[in-house]
Image: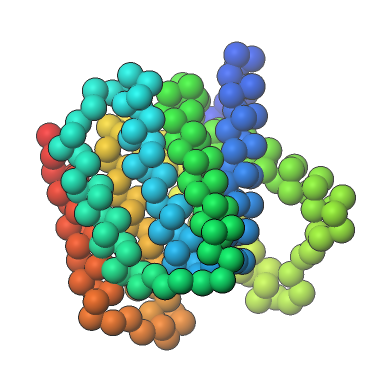
Amino acid sequence: MRAQGVRIAIPRELRGRTLVAGILIATQSYSLYSAVALIPPALALLVFQTSPMLYVLLTWALGKEKPSLGALPPMLLALVGLALALNVRGADNMGAGVAWAFASSLSMTVVYYLNANALKSLDGRLRTFAMTAVTAVLVIVFATAAGTQAVPRDALGWTGLVLLAVFYCIAMMSLFYVLPRVPSTSTGALNFEPIALLFLTSLFLGHTFTALQLVGAVITVGAIAWLGVRK
């Protein structure tokens, strides 16, 4: 940020909102990882992917954008495609797992809104820096207090941790840069994330997927394209 000339300073009137956004990011992460510990990751991610649609509804409810009923069919169709692509099945602790995943979705919905509105004036890199810094402090403090703090045990683990940090920050900076510049319905493209995960696990982990899952992937991508080409 220094090299790129980004001023590392948050205006006084935005500091409270930035802190709230950071707490919400920490809540979102903890909730999603808690969900994954209880139910299949595919189901947890599917529930979490309601956040772009909740964000659209929130912007409509708060009068930031005029409601567009035409955006609802492609969003619902994308969810149907996700359900097929992820081949979701039941699991023990379903209620608790879904509740954690939905809590994660709600937290991220508010983060989307804050970034597109209340924190719009801040550089996306600065927003990412501030929010991840708050999350880091919360994790260090609470995990240390609970005696659950741990670090990787070998070079492979450290490599994974470093790459995770790099890719996560690139993704979040890109997301927070784009959010204030596009209509809320464009966040429907985030529904492509589970589809990307489906193909990546097949490519790198050797997972296989069925014809029904491929159909679901096509439906999801088609719904996203439908949403994107709308005026």
Q: Position of residue 166 (x, y in %)?
A: 55, 56
Q: Is residue 198 above or below residue 179?
A: below
Residue 25: which quarter of the image? Answer: top right
Q: Please, which residue is most extreme toward the top here?
A: 13
Location of the C terminus by quadrant is top left
- Residue 148: x and y in percent read 81, 60
Q: Is residue 90 above or below residue 176?
A: below
Q: Is residue 82 left or right of residue 68?
A: right
Give the colour scheme of this rendering. Answer: rainbow
Give 190 or 109, whichever is nearer the viewer: 109
From the viewer's side, name the closer residue of 176 and 8.
176
Is residue 129 among what the camera can see? no
Q: From the viewer's perspective, tell me whether residue 169 is left or right of residue 135.
A: left
Question: Which residue is drawn at the image coordinates 41% and 44% (left, top)?
Answer: 51
Task: Name the residue rendered at 39%, 70% in the picture.
Answer: 88
Is 55 left or right of 7, judged from the image as shown? left
Image vertical order of residue 70 relative to residue 97, above or below: above
Q: Is residue 73 visible?
A: yes
Residue closest to the eye, 44 or 191: 44
Q: Residue at x 28, y 23 (%)?
A: 65
| Rendered location of residue 177, percent (x, y) | 41, 36
Q: How many marks?
A: 0
Quadrant in which the N terminus appears: top right
**Residue 24 spot, x, y in % from top left:** 59, 38
Q: Image point 77% across, 74% down: which residue?
A: 153
